[in-house]
Image (spheres, rainbow, N blue to C red):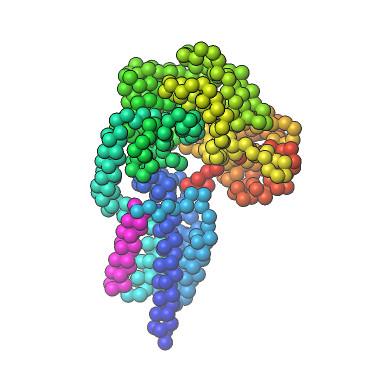
Amino acid sequence: MDSIINLIFGIILVATALADMWVVFARDLMMLQQNSYRADRYWRWFSQSGESTNVGRILCCVALLFILVHHIPFFAGAAIAVIITGGQFVHLVRKKYKKPLVWTPRVRRICAVMWTLAVVIGLVAWLLLGLKGACGMLLAMLIISPILLIGANDILAPVEKRINKKYYDEAAAILASMPDLKIIGITGSYGKTSTKHYLHRILSEQFNTTMTPGSFNTTMGVIRTVREHLRPYDEVFIVEMGAKQLGDINEICDLVHPHAGIITAVGEQHLESFKTIENVQRTKFELADAIPADGFVVLNNDFPMVASREVKNTEALRYGVSSGRDTDFTASEVVYTPLGTTFTITGKGLPEPLILHTKLVGECNVSNLMAAVIVALRLGMCPDKIRYAVEQIEQVEHRLNMKRTPAGITIIDDAFNSNPAGSKMALEVLAMMRPGKRIIITPGMIELGDLQEKANEEFGRGISRCADVAIIVGHYNRDAIMEGLAGGGIPQENIHAVDSFADAQRLLQTLAVAGDTVLYENDLPDTFK
């Protein structure tokens, strides 16, 4: 009788463990995907996020202990393990992610290898150790699932390399077949995605133009764009170039061979991987170094690490907002209103000042528009077409996007990303919003390496000068921001710490009224807590 009961509970445990394994593997794959399938980046996240000792993993260790302890009946240990694995399955199935797993062919291949490894290990355990051993092994694999993940990724590395090489060659052949295509690269610590959108809208007034969509700013993202989006009749191809380490930009340039480029900023972003600001500068200027002598590069001199870097291999057009520091183009007379921004560009080759109006707000957007306008002028577009296109540009989602709710509350959505320069500009916009309360909701800034705490403390001081109410989300930067807020202009009762954006939204509903302005500054990805 006992053996039948053990068999029943064992089978139930195998079923719930396999179901749990499916969602655990999917979550592991999601995090590997968000870390660019790089084992080093995945392990860095794994060690820093507390994932190695999360509640699910600890409870699976407890379940494994109950299975292995001899003086506890197997069916009792199995029942406890069923409750634990079943509970974790329900929790992970119901959990919502900001950037869920995308089931690409690569993800499917890794998942298939993971399951092959798991099934083989489980069957061997069953044959050698029986049902109890198989159940114990399934629980163990739930605990060490990241090892299975990275093992599968490593096994497939040669396959992925061959597949990527095939796609690379196809993209290179397509580009080679379009010798008249003008390719414009855009990179920078921040501002590159917005600048890409603005440039695409302006150039589309005169040229057939394609840009890399979304955040397709890696080599493989560019390859996919060339193969799937580039049209034979295109005249301009705008390529966003992202980087997290030295050589990333150079790799993209070796594929597309840009004729022109824009460097929007060199700042303290991704310092966890770059280590130093000098490495950030070297990487971003890989774009400038790749431009041929008959091309040109547009450089934002408002950033010292851009202004101080010489460019001798091609024409360099430098710009700035108000500073005028050794610039060829300058934006001045910047005026913000509820209807947008008006500003004036003066500079090289302009017979008269170019007065522009845009729906966008914030100095960062003026700067990004300037870079796009300079390229358009250099490609021969007339000021009237540029002026019209700038007037029509819509705000890029989650990048200082301003809108008004039916309840009369103004929302400034700057949730895509945050950095010291961008957050400062967002706070300056918030400070100008009158009348009504100025409310900020933020988890702070990430990927700043050794400057993380200092930058978020300074961010807190900025909040104390520009906001009336502060809602700090999560624990990752809470202490540093609170330190910056201490002794500032915000009363203590108007400073709130919450665990999640859902909690922040619930609190906001009790605080905000018509006439108030709410700034959403940054929205941490799933890899941060």
Task: Say above or below: 336 vs 449.
Answer: above
Between 484 and 463, the one lying in front of the other is 463
What residue appears at the point 39 percent right and 83 percent down from the top-left corner?
A: 3
Between 349 and 384, the one lying in front of the other is 384
* Residue 340 position within the rendered picture, expressed as x and y whole percent measured from the top left: 63, 29
Residue placed farthest to the bottom in the image?
1
What residue appears at the point 59 percent right and 49 percent down from the top-left corner?
A: 500
Q: Quadrant of residue 68?
A: bottom left
Q: Is residue 123 magenta?
A: yes
Task: Say above or below: 313 vs 68.
Answer: above
* Residue 217 position within the rendered picture, expressed as x and y whole percent measured from the top left: 40, 38
Q: Is residue 270 magenta?
A: no
Between 342 and 206, the one lying in front of the other is 206
What residue appears at the point 67 percent right and 40 percent down from the top-left corner?
A: 404
Q: Is residue 443 left or right of residue 122?
A: right
Is residue 163 visible from the viewing direction of this image? yes
* Residue 392 position within the rendered picture, expressed as x and y whole percent measured from the top left: 56, 32
- The span picked out in magenta is 106-129
User: Looking at the magenta stretch, what is its main secondary structure?
Assistant: helix
Task: Say above or below: 327 vs 117.
Answer: above
* Residue 492 position within the rendered picture, expressed as x and y whole percent measured from the top left: 71, 38
